[in-house]
Amino acid sequence: MKLVFATNNQHKLEEVRAILGDNHEVLSLKEIDFHGDIPETAGTLEGNALQKAQFVKEHFGLDCFADDTGLEVDALGGEPGVYSARYAGDAHDSEANMKKLLQKMAKKSDRKARFRTVVALIQGEETHLFEGIINGSIIRKRRGNGGFGYDPIFVPEGYTETLAEIGDEKNKISHRARAIAKLAEFLRQQEVENKTD
Ligand code: IMP
């Protein structure tokens, strides 16, 4: 089955292809010859994921899925959430984003946070949403050089290392892996049902 993944992020593409396996041909935006930026103007992760998937469906007529992720910090009322990429400004600068977050958290004792990914799938006329969460806490000083984004200041529940220190293990336990695993299970189930029809 052919499915577009509304991304040009090579790392995400490989992660998703590995989880979905050979039964699904996953095409990136580049591979359907789209080289622009898809608008992400909704105020929620769900809204942005849907907006991206709908854009591809409308312009290319292809079944598609899209993801959107945010870091939700309890003591900040869920910030930075949907604004995680541009928390410290439009430059999408991870160092500046972490610095701003650590400053806002300086006097907070409740350090609980989660990464949440929403995947929106549009298949024909139908829309399906899948959610993946990893709970953890925000530490006071960055640690580790792996990963990206807020990884150096996030320690997952049950671990002592940050996401930037745990290496490949991250791809097994991450919010994105969990959401994509739900998508994969949904597609597998559909195949089983189609075979028995
Ligand atoms: P996106 O929706 O996947 O583009 O993620 C939005 C923003 O959330 C990114 O720019 C990062 O700041 C942050 N983010 C997403 N996934 C991760 C992750 O796995 N680790 C750390 N930060 C992440």
Image (spheres, helix red, strand yellow):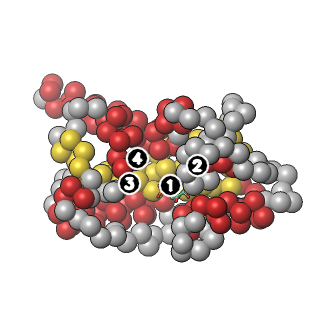
- Measured from the top left, where is residue 187 in percent x and y? 28, 36
SS for dot 1:
strand
The circle drawn on residue 11 is: 4
SS for dot 2:
strand
SS for dot 3:
loop
Q: Residues within 10 Å of mark 1 (few under 14, many from 20)?
A: many
Nearer the N terminus, badge 1 or badge 2?
Answer: 1
Task: State if disc 4 and disc 1 touch (CB < 8 Å).
Answer: no
Q: Which residue is mark 1?
A: 69
Question: Residue drawn 25% across and 45% down?
Answer: 26
What is the three-letter code of the residue carrying label 2? Phe
Alpha carbon separation for disc pair 2 and 4? 18 Å
* Between 27 and 144, the one nearer to me in the picture: 144
- Measured from the top left, where is residue 117 in percent x and y? 49, 50
Task: State if disc 2 and disc 1 touch (CB < 8 Å).
Answer: yes
- Measured from the top left, where is residue 30 in percent x and y? 24, 59
Nearer the N terminus, badge 1 or badge 4?
Answer: 4
Alpha carbon separation for disc pair 3 and 1? 14 Å
Task: State if disc 4 and disc 3 touch (CB < 8 Å).
Answer: yes
Please say whether residue 129 is visible from this viewpoint: no
Q: Residues within 10 Å of mark 3 (few under 14, many from 20)?
A: few
What is the three-letter code of the residue carrying label 4? His
| Residue 78 drawn above or below residue 24 | below
Nearer the N terminus, badge 2 or badge 3?
Answer: 3
Q: Which residue is mark 2?
A: 115
Question: Residue drawn 48% across and 59% down?
Answer: 45
The circle drawn on residue 9 is: 3
Nearer to us: label 2 or label 3: 3
Alpha carbon separation for disc pair 2 and 3? 18 Å
